[in-house]
Image (cartoon, grey):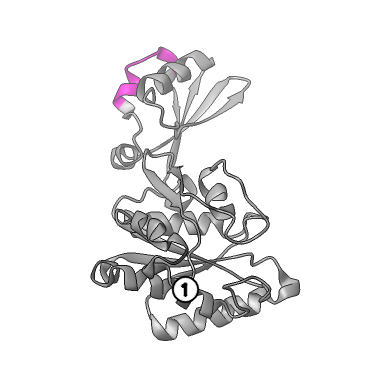
Amino acid sequence: SSIASSVCRMMTRIGPEEYSTTRPHTGVIRFRDGVNIKLTDLPGITEGAAEDRLRGLRVLRHMYRAKLLVYVIKMGKGGDVVGTSEDPLKDFEAVYNEVMKHDTAWNEQRKWIVCATMCDMLHKDSLFHLDSLYFRLRARFPEVVVIGTSARFGLGIKRLVDEIRTQLYPDALVPSFRERQIPIQRLIAPSTEEVRQITEEFYASGRHSLLEAQAQQDGIRVYLPEDEGSRAALGMPSMDRLGSGEEALQRIEA
């Protein structure tokens, strides 16, 4: 529940004890380029869930429509909770085996990753458990992705979200401005009205504007990629459209 609330701002109760989630909760991960990914936080399952122990089948049935499974395994915990152990690999195997028993043929084709949470609990050797889990899982599943996170401090959350999107939409990634390192041009407008007209017209659908505007003494500085292909990929208006508008937008600085 902590991880789900961190990646999609899901409003749900987060209890200090394990198995506090008793019903599924669904949230949406929204990206600024319009891609939305639905995420469902399922209650924890224990051994025997595939045989409907503790109503485990009611949880497993929600996985049918899932395109990606994220196994959330806690690092740095003791064995004081029923159904858990000090070895994260045993906790993973317990959940993984129940999922495979439920529908082996379907789950063998389904994508999945491992999210190691509570990695900030250094006093419980969380990083040691993370390394141990990573290398032992890679020995069994060479292509598995293991991501260490901390919902409390926000560590690894961005990487987790990026990996979820990469797994689901590998061909629809739109890197950020700095990652693309696109050459930019600057347009100077005497007021915010001209900039606002452009952004409202092209981003009225609710998508976040990718234009960066900065107030200056001589107007508003708007950053745009130089080539038309990059602007089209980012959903930005063309230079022809900008040049045909207000006269102030025709002043371009290299």
Work out whether residue 144 can be spotted. no
Residue extent of the magenta highlight:
240-248
What residue is at 45 percent from the left and 55 percent from the top? Answer: 162
Q: Secondary structure at mark 1?
A: loop
The answer to if 46 sits in the magenta stretch is no
Image coordinates of residue 44 in percent, x first then y, are: 50, 61
What residue is at 42 percent from the left and 68 percent from the top? Answer: 49
Left or right of 25 on screen, residue 244: left
Image coordinates of residue 16 in percent, x first then y, are: 68, 57
Quarter of the image that includes the C terminus: top left
What residue is at 43 percent from the left and 70 percent from the top? Answer: 145
How many numbered circles does the render carry? Answer: 1
Q: For mark 1, does the 10 Å Cα neighbourhood hold few (<14), some (14 to 19), or many (20 or more) residues?
A: some
Task: Name the amino acid, label 1.
Answer: Glu
Q: Nearer the viewer, residue 81 or 116?
A: 81
Q: Nearer the viewer, residue 212 or 166?
A: 166
Image coordinates of residue 80 in percent, x first then y, are: 68, 73
Task: Indicate whether 225 appears above or below 56.
Answer: above
Left or right of 202 on screen, residue 185: right
Main secondary-structure element of the magenta-colored stretch: helix
Task: State the residue position of label 1.
Answer: 47
The answer to if 245 sits in the magenta stretch is yes
Q: Nearer the viewer, residue 16 or 240?
A: 16
Image coordinates of residue 61 in percent, x first then y, are: 34, 57
Which of the 4 quarters of the picture holds residue 20? Answer: bottom right
Work out whether residue 148 can be spotted. yes
Residue ranking furthest to the right: 123
Left or right of 68 on screen, residue 115: right
